[in-house]
Amino acid sequence: MLPATSESAAVANQLPNLQQHTPPPDNYGQIKPCSHLRSVLETKAYQTVLNTYQQAVAISIAINPLLSSHLVYQLKKDGLKVSHSRLDEFKAKALRCSLCDTSNFYLVFVCLQCPHVGCYKKHGMQHAKESGHMFAIDSHNGLLFCFSCGNYTNHSDLNRIRLSCVAACLGSPNGKTGITFGNGTENDTSFDVDSNIDGYTRPLGSAIQGLKGIVNMGSTCFMSCILQTMLHNPLVRYQFFNNDLHFFNCPSQPHYNGADEMIDENSACITCLIDSAFKDFYTTPTAEGYGLTNLLTTAWYKNRLLAGFQEQDAHEFWQFLLNEFHSDHERVAELADILLLPCRCIMHSIFLGELESSIACNSCGNVTKTVDPLVDLPLEINHLNENPSLYDCLDQFTHNELLDVNYRCSLCGKESKAHKSLRIKKLSPVLSIQLKRFKHNMLLDKASKIETKVDIPLFLNLTKYASDWDETTAPDAIDTNKVYELFAMVHHQGLVNTGHYVALVKNSSGQWFKFDDSVVSYASQEEVKSTNAYLLFYISHTI
């Protein structure tokens, strides 16, 4: 046995090594919840907040410098250890302010309600004011920060989740973190970071694909096909999964969120209805068809022309939804005292572009340009060559047209012939195109349908149809920012008044599906190409 002095010295020599594997004290549990956090956790959003926090707090745990010396990172590929300096490089690239690229971990906040990452100095606060997302996670310590209070806030349930994440990172068995509270007691919880939160059920793999049919309730296929294009639009889906502004502030939410309250003229809300549809499509394990009862009721209250069970135009219903999204956003933003400009509703942020009209005076050559909002491109398919393509339709839409009447020039003041052309000034993230298959004869008061087959490209190059295209210097140039991918199509089959609508949609894996009311089936690329399209939805790869 070693002498006492030698034994003491041996223990003393081992202390640095013991301290290296002992996490520092954690006093964050003594931070009390602010009034804003308490009010949110007392609502139906309680489980959502806990689940979101559980996922987001893992980021701060991974980069926390107080824990970094206790964690060992390995490459999945070969199990090699990753040095902390190399890890810091990865962190600096991955976690930085979305707007100014600040990557100082002490100043970067991760929004609890959407994927936004912002610096505390400016853009985190700016995002909170503009979006109404008042809570963010400090990427340095994993604490919740309330921008309304301007201070940290905590809750026993959130703290339990955070400490369990720490325990999981440290590889601690049976939930012990080895981290002490301010009172010196060690946190010992059996909370499993991978387990389900109370009241939350992890959706099945089949559910998260959103593959579900919609029951036809009597000539409602025009609603079903448009709803499918919305539900499978990745940008619209992202908006609804992060639409906390509407969820927390719209008084109509209880009417659509499983409560027994009936929908009436005062409570009808399209955004709440579509939000509940997203929840049903992407979380419920059953593959049974979705019922349109609430959509029919809400639509009837909002637009009396949609009342009844007569076939309607799918394009008009799509426009109706966009207008309702905008109206709902304005209403809720005003209730929440959020800045309305620039508008961040679904219509403005996803579908709205700009169309530039140019009129050239034949006398002096002066060109007058005006810019108008562009929600979708209406393309004529009449008077085209045999076997036309979508590019032929775009060429006809943007060609230099001689005006039928004389034009008074604002520069020279003369009345003369003039030419007019249209170009896309600003492309939207999602471009909607309507092929004008239906026409109405005013004299006979009769509608007819144009069955012309138009070849539809799966990837659409819009370079030459943009206002900044220079035909003289680079006529064949391709701007990759203006190449769009087809992801949804609406087809009308049959006669004008007795036809049927079907939707074809491509998922994130590149597989096409056919949605024919309650029937969902695989569709080949060849079937998509051979379908007589009515509405087309293209998405940009550079958002």
Image (tube, rainbow, N blue to C red):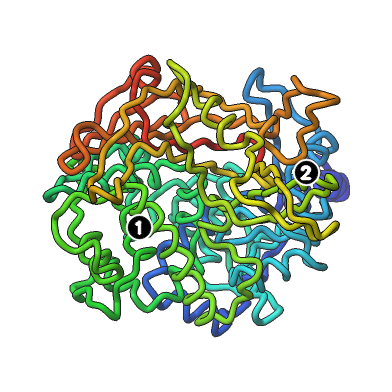
Q: Quadrant of residue 285?
A: top left
Q: Residues within 10 Å of mark 2 (few under 14, many from 20)?
A: some
Q: Is residue 281 visible?
A: no
Secondary element under disc 2, as helix, strand or loop, is loop
Q: Nearer the viewer, residue 358 or 535?
A: 358
Q: Which residue is mark 2?
A: 362
Amino acid beneath label 1:
Ile
Looking at the image, is 394 positioned above or below residue 149? above
How far across and down, in percent of the image, does residue 181 sit?
62, 69
Image quarter in which the C terminus is found: top right
In 3D space, how far apart are the residues under numbered discs 2 and 1 (Cα atoms)? 51 Å
Please tell me which of labels 2 and 1 falls first in the chain. 1
> Relative to residue 419, is residue 373 drawn left or right?
left
Secondary element under disc 1, as helix, strand or loop, is helix
Q: Nearer the viewer, residue 77 or 170?
A: 77
How far across and down, in percent of the image, does residue 371 sit?
68, 55
Looking at the image, is 73 positioned above or below residue 378? above
Image quarter in which the N terminus is found: top right
How far across and down, in percent of the image, does residue 311 sit?
19, 49
Q: Which residue is mark 1?
A: 274
